[in-house]
């Protein structure tokens, strides 16, 4: 029986190294290639046959739902399994709606990941057992059909997002909210992680698309 060929996409080399060791040492699985960012992944897929992509949700440049859409445009039948640190149900639901066949968290045990890879590569679907209940609830919500990852933000993160979207500098936001600049930067970093955004331009586009501004 031919092995299941897997392409790994994660911007951390130590994560890719660990995943390669796990998968290559598992009977019936073989890593076909690695990519550290979205553009490299697309180039690799253009020249490397594979059965499944094991994809980190947040990488530099092209990533997240946009990257899933690009992969499906070029390789409509290629299964995608997300492996991410994000556990928020709206984010998981959003990427599943975008076309990912499965979602596993980075703190899952190795055997769970192996099971997920095999199931998704064989045409099935997989959701990390720790997320099943919350994700099913999210998918069933009538108001979540478009996926709204900013619903996962804390009130303070939402406030920082609104002020950035309205054109305020981080220093001004810190002064207005009576916070240190470092704290505001931390809020910004966390909200961008939750929204799967990489740059200020991505953040502004997201805010405009969803009508998020400071009133």
Image (cartoon, rainbow, N blue to C red):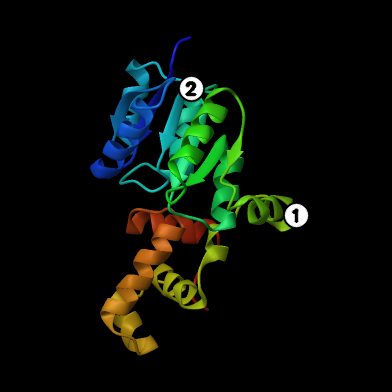
Labelled disc at residue 142: 1
- Mark 1 surroundings within 10 Å by alpha-carbon count, few (fewer than 14), some (14 through 19), many (20 or more): few
Q: Is residue 185 above or below residue 149?
A: below
Position in image of residue 188 (x %, y %): 36, 68
**Residue occupying image coordinates x 45% and y 32%:** 70
Q: Residues within 10 Å of mark 2 (few under 14, many from 20)?
A: few
The residue nearer to you, when weighing 204 against 90, is 90
Judge whether residue 181 can be spotted in this image: yes
**Residue placed at 56% from the left, 46% from the top?**
128
Q: Position of residue 46 (x, y in %)?
A: 36, 19
- Relative height, residue 74 to residue 176 (above, below): above
Q: How many marks?
A: 2
In the displayed structure, does residue 89 sit left or right of residue 160? right
- Toward the top, the furthest residue is 1
Up the image or down, 49 lies above or below 20; here it is: above
Front one among 168 and 185? 185
Q: Nearer the viewer, residue 44 or 146?
A: 44
Does 72 sit left or right of 135 as displayed? left
Q: Please tell me the numbered disc located at residue 108.
A: none
Sequence-first tag of 2 and 1: 2
Please name the residue shown 57% across and 40% down the image. Answer: 98
Depth order, front residue of 34/144 = 34
**Residue 73 on image: x %, y %:** 50, 26
Where residue 191 sits, quadrant-wise, is: bottom left
Could you say which quadrant of the image residue 55 lies in? top left
Mark 1 falls on what kind of element?
helix
- Whether pointer 2 and pointer 1 mark residues with C-beta atoms closer than 8 Å, the reply is no
Q: Which residue is disc 2 drawn over?
A: 75
Real-space Cα distance between discs 2 and 1? 30 Å
Circle 2 SS class: loop
């Amino acid at each position: 029986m031919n092995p299941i060929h897997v392409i790994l996409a994660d911007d951390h080399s130590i994560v890719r190294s660990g995943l390669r060791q796990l998968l290559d040492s598992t009977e019936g699985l073989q890593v076909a290639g690695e990519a550290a960012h979205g553009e490299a992944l697309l180039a690799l897929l253009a020249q490397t046959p594979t059965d499944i992509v094991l994809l980190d949700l947040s990488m530099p440049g092209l990533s997240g739902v946009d990257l899933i859409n690009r992969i499906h445009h070029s390789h409509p039948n290629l299964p995608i399994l997300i492996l991410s640190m994000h556990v928020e149900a709206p984010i998981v639901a959003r990427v599943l709606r975008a076309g990912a066949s499965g979602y596993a968290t980075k703190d899952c045990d190795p055997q769970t990941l192996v099971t997920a890879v095999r199931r998704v590569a064989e045409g099935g679907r997989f959701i990390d057992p720790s997320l099943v209940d919350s994700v099913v609830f999210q998918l069933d919500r009538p108001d979540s059909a478009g996926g709204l990852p900013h619903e996962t933000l804390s009130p303070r993160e939402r406030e920082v997002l609104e002020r950035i979207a309205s054109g305020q500098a981080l220093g001004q936001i810190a002064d207005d909210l009576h916070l240190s600049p470092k704290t505001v930067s931390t809020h910004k970093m966390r909200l961008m992680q939750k929204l799967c955004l990489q740059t200020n331009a991505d953040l502004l586009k997201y805010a405009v698309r969803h009508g998020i501004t400071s009133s």
